[in-house]
Amino acid sequence: MSSPSKRREMDLMKLMMSDYKVEMINDGMQEFYVEFHGPKDSPYHGGVWRIRVELPDAYPYKSPSIGFVNKIYHPNVDEMSGSVCLDVINQTWSPMFDLVNVFEVFLPQLLLYPNPSDPLNGEAAALMMRDRNTYEQRVKEAIDFRRLLALMRRFKGHLCEGDKGHLCSIEYCEKYAKPEDAGAAPAEKSSDEELSEDEYPSSDDEEVAGKADP
């Protein structure tokens, strides 16, 4: 049986070898960010999120802490902190699971099959139960709008297409850009361009969102 530290190292390497973009937070191997793409066949397809992961000392016998860093409109993600309501993470975790399971199975299932009966975002849950089509449109608009803002930040100071020579500014775009304007963005963008910069506020000690109960 491998030690917890060895298992953490093995699982992290396996995740990185599965072509996930991983950014370490410190010199250790217990806190890091992972770039997560919304699954196909869901309204979240095309969105890119930064997930903060914290592996406890007892991992894999204790579940990892998972939280969205940039905002997502979802019934089971807290709209203020990015905490995730996911039974397999918070309650039914098993040492047989690993980090690849989290990003290839558990999180995609969360986005494919939201559970509005156990919400962390009451507004999103109520809208989903009342009008599924409007809910999905709201998700897509939020993704497109934040991609547009990220693009404007990336090219701050450049001329906007169709802007009659006026310089772009973040303030201008945040005030006047509409979700439907996202169609003016280039068809092909890198993940850095697509990644939303609209992040949840972090505490002073940068405690991970979605941290599991002890």
Image (cartoon, helix red, strand yellow):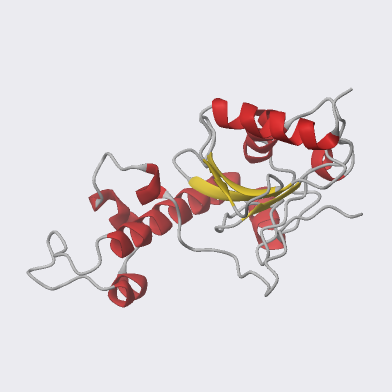
Q: Is residue 11 left or right of residue 44?
A: right
Q: Report the label total.
A: 0
At 68% from the left and 72% from the top, the residue drawn is: 203
Query: At 82% across and 47% down in the image, what residue appears?
Result: 56
Residue 106 vs residue 14, the one in the foreground: 14
Q: Position of residue 21 (x, y in %)?
A: 51, 39
Q: Quadrant of residue 80?
A: bottom right
Instruction: Name the spot of residue 72 as percent of width and height, x first.
Output: 57, 54
Residue sitting farthest toward the top: 1
Instruction: Report the residue at 33% width, 55% height from top.
Output: 180
Task: Answer with left or right where residue 204 lies relative to residue 16.
Answer: right
- Where is residue 143 drawn, in percent x and y? 45, 51
Looking at the picture, tell me which residue is in the foreground, 184 or 135. Answer: 184
Q: Residue at x 78, y 55 (%)?
A: 211
Residue sticking out furthest to the front: 27
Q: Position of residue 105 (x, y in %)?
A: 68, 29
The N terminus sits in image quarter: top right
- In the image, farthest residue toward the left: 165
The quarter of the picture where residue 46 lies is top left
75 left or right, relative to 153: right
Question: Which quadrant of the figure contains the C terminus?
Answer: bottom right
Placement of 115 over or under 17, stated as above or below: below
Q: 122 and 97: which one is in front?
A: 97
Depicted 71 relative to depicted 38: above or below: below
